[in-house]
Image (spheres, grey):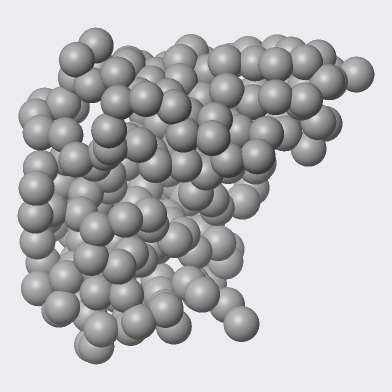
């Protein structure tokens, strides 16, 4: 039983394309997140959603947009992909205030 | 702003004890987390400290001093499988479930 799942696991695409990464959690958590981990392994938060409301948005380009169709899903849409977007993107979820559970990650490569 | 510092790399011998330090300067503090991340995998939760003192969990212990902005993760009886990155993360302001991560410490355990 996967707690936090992401699809796809690998994504290779060309500059300028638009792509989406999906995330689902079956833990019943209230909050979901997207993180970006760059080549230096620095993990940086991008977004978090609590009960379908965006509560933080850490200075990411507006080419990135989170979409939450329901409490169990938080998808990440990326428009006009750039080389610098290449990274591993992690989805995570948490109950109201404690540890976060991370998905397996999506390795995005922009060529 | 948020500033979280950890050593970049450490090496230790199997069976030994290693201490990984983390210092932080953040706007707001609601707890400090340690995560373990094996290469190519998602971060997994190790420990959580919100009050000063030592939290022990099996071979792993975590210490927090809020007045000094300092924490450490202590790993005892090191095993080869403990080779991984260890991420220090601080939970920021009350009401927000955001975690701010350090750059991580890559620990290599040698025979």
Q: Position of residue B87 (x, y in %)?
A: 46, 33
Q: Position of residue A33 (x, y in %)?
A: 29, 61
Q: Position of residue A53 (x, y in %)?
A: 9, 73
Q: Residue at x 51, y 75 (%)?
A: A3
| Side (left or right) of A3 relative to B69 | right
- Say how many tags the image has: 0
In this rendered view, identify the residue nearer to me: A13 or B72.
B72
Q: Position of residue A101 (x, y in %)?
A: 44, 61
Q: Is residue B47 visible?
A: yes
In this rendered view, identify the residue nearer to me: B94 or A110.
B94
Which residue lies most toward the bottom here? A70
B108 w.r.t. A79: above or below = above
In this rendered view, identify the residue nearer to me: B99 or A21.
B99
Q: Residue at x 16, y 70 (%)?
A: A50
In this rendered view, identify the residue nearer to me: A25 or A69.
A25
| Side (left or right) of B17 relative to A40 | right
């Amino acid at each position: 039983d996967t707690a936090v799942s992401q699809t796809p696991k690998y994504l290779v695409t060309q500059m300028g394309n638009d792509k989406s990464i999906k995330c689902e959690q079956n833990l019943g958590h209230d909050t979901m997140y997207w993180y970006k981990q760059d080549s230096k392994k620095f993990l940086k938060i991008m977004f978090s959603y609590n009960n379908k409301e965006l509560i933080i948005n850490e200075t990411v380009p507006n080419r990135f947009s989170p979409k939450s169709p329901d409490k169990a899903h938080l998808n990440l849409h990326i428009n006009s992909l750039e080389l610098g977007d290449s990274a591993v993107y992690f989805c995570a979820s948490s109950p109201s205030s404690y540890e976060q559970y991370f998905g397996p990650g999506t390795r995005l490569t922009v060529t | 702003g948020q500033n979280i510092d950890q050593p970049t790399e450490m090496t230790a011998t199997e069976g030994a004890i290693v201490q990984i330090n983390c210092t932080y300067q953040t706007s707001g503090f609601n707890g400090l987390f340690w995560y373990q991340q094996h290469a190519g995998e998602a971060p997994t939760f190790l420990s959580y400290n919100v009050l000063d003192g030592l939290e022990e969990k099996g071979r792993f212990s975590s210490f927090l001093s809020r007045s000094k902005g300092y924490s450490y993760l202590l790993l005892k009886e090191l095993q080869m499988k403990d080779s991984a990155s260890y991420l220090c993360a601080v939970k920021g302001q009350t009401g927000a479930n955001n975690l701010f991560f350090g750059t991580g410490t890559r620990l290599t355990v040698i025979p």
